[in-house]
Image (cartoon, rainbow, N blue to C red):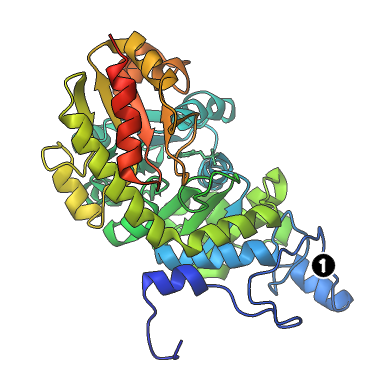
Amino acid sequence: MSEDRIPGFDTLAVHAGAQPDPTTGARATPIYQTSSFVFDDADHAASLFGLEAFGNIYTRIGNPTCAVLEERVAALEGGTAALAVASGHAAQHLVFYTIMDPGDEFIAARQLYGGSINQFGQSFKKSDWNVVWADADNIESFEKAVTPRTKAIFVESIANPGGRVTDIAAISQVARRAGVPLIVDNTLASPYLCNPFEHGADIIVHSATKFLGGHGNSIGGVIVDGGTFNWSREGRYPMLSKPNESYGGLIFHETFGNFAFAIACRMVGLRDYGPALSPFNAFLILTGIETLPLRMQKHCENALAISEFLDAHDKVAWVNYAGLPGDRHHNLAEKYCPRGAGAVLTFGLKGGYEAGLQLVSNVYLFSLLANIGDTRSLILHPASTTHRQLTEQQRSAAGAGSDVVRLSVGIEDKEDLIADLEAALESLP
Ligand SMILES: *Cc1c(COP(=O)(O)O)cnc(C)c1O
């Protein structure tokens, strides 16, 4: 790359953060499979622990393979810094740990990954972090939910499992007025399809398990700092704006400016809670990211063809895919995801719950499992699996009512995928 050119997305997907290994010349990023790193001398060790210098200490806090992944995702999202962690849920936990104090509230769209509904609604309660639900299709519901204890707003760019697109810019205006950061889970879109920072997000989280890794072979998560939020405002974010005793009174925001959030997540949250990403998983996710643009193009092309097929089928009651011109989120998809509406879609069977169970048992190429973002095509009946623990009302609100089938469309030949669904639909009464 010449120095004066700003590389495009596809180039960054292959190169950002990586260079030939200075010692061995290895071209692919090596897996630094080590728990710890030797210090130059005692002074070097002291400066690393005091955050006066950056460097490798111990793989729970950072690792060179993970660092390449962090730089790459930060570059693809246009953030100032990133932090790779053990899972998408670990990413969410560390983000809220850094933002929230007991008794605080955050507003989240109801249309979320089922696991996030549990994490926010149940587990976070033990820390007295209180979620207030809003409706992603009703901006006013976010506005109304703001109280003096609100510390953040959380939405998904493309929402799981409904295949719907969120008006990020409108919700970011609510966050601005409330003086809180907007956190966007960009898992379903990936940075190839949607760039939340351009639309006013302050923090992005990813389940790298899904499209970033893309091959269904490793669990991982990433936090990306947009560098946009003023953490020192009115002292509402003490982890960032007040002296930290474990670093001799250092103030994160004052010291690290527009990447303070990522540093605090790492040097406090990751250090103390410990959900570190293994360098081996970082290597697999990095390798996956190299083909993210190519995969997302094929994912979107296949998903559109399948949603058109389903939309015309007489056993199908409705299809939710924002890529379809008639879809209620199509305009939002054109604004936020101009290259395609992603690979996850839902549809309803006229035969309801029973038909859903039967359909997922009668496909061959589609795998019945609880994941998305694999090269392979995946199918799920959320009401009997991922959303089973929710009430019927919560399920419907999350787009996972009893007749709903979710697809994560892979990168196989679309003709084969359609033939598989066609045969399974024929077998329904
Ligand atoms: C899978 C998923 C998560 C959780 O990520 P894990 O890597 O499974 O912990 C969070 N948000 C969305 C949208 C997801 O699809």
Image: 267 above or below 324: below
In-image side of 218 versus 335 (left or right): right
Image: 137 above or below 32: above
Image quarter of residue 50: bottom right
Q: Residue at x 69, y 55 (%)?
A: 280
Task: Pick whichever, 263 or 222, lies toward us.
Answer: 222
Q: Position of residue 177 (x, y in %)?
A: 26, 49
Residue at the extreme left of the image, as rendered: 326
| Residue at mark 1: C-beta within 8 A of ligand 1 | no
Q: Which residue is mark 1?
A: 37
Q: Position of residue 221 (x, y in %)?
A: 55, 48
Mark 1 belongs to which amino acid?
Phe
Q: Position of residue 116 (x, y in %)?
A: 47, 32
Q: Residue at x 38, y 48 (%)?
A: 184
In-image side of 237 versus 199 (left or right): right
In-image side of 223 versus 53 (left or right): left
SS class, disc 1: loop
- Which quarter of the image is occupied by the C terminus? top left
